[in-house]
Amino acid sequence: MAETLKAKYNEDGKIIVTIFKNEIDITDKFKDGVAHLNLYGKDYEVRAPKQTKKISVKKAKDNGKEVDVGFIESPDED
């Protein structure tokens, strides 16, 4: 019977599993959120949630700038 492991994505979007102090990248072995491994004579089933893509939203441009209004002095007419 295979031992089930739960995994998460790291900041680079890869899944790295640590088994017996060895880090193994298994990102390419996933199919439908499940990967089957046979390491060191033991079967492992690794499950991970589907990776969600982050969408960056651009902020709307703000063309309104603060205007410094000064007073215009007109010459005195006598």
Image (cartoon, rainbow, N blue to C red):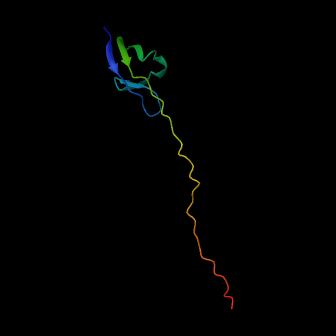
Q: Which residue is located at x 55 percent, y 46 percent?
A: 60
Q: How far from the left and from the top, in percent, is residue 26?
A: 45, 21
**Count of numbered circles in the view:** 0
Q: Is residue 57 left or right of residue 78?
A: left
Q: Is residue 51 left or right of residue 19?
A: right
Extreme top residue here? 1
Extreme front residue here? 78
Q: Which residue is located at x 36 percent, y 14 percent?
A: 45
Q: Could you tell me which quadrant the C terminus lies in? A: bottom right
Q: Nearer the viewer, residue 48 or 71?
A: 71
Q: Nearer the viewer, residue 7 or 42?
A: 7
Q: Which residue is located at x 48 percent, y 30 percent?
A: 53
Q: How far from the left and from the top, in percent, is residue 66?
A: 55, 63
Q: How far from the left and from the top, in percent, is residue 4?
A: 32, 16
Q: Residue 1's quadrant in the figure?
A: top left
Q: How far from the left and from the top, in percent, is residue 47?
A: 37, 19
Is 11 rendered above or below residue 74? above
Is 17 rendered above or below residue 57? above
Is 54 rendered above or below residue 67? above
Q: Is residue 12 left or right of residue 61?
A: left
Q: Residue 18's quadrant in the figure?
A: top left
Q: Residue 50's quadrant in the figure?
A: top left
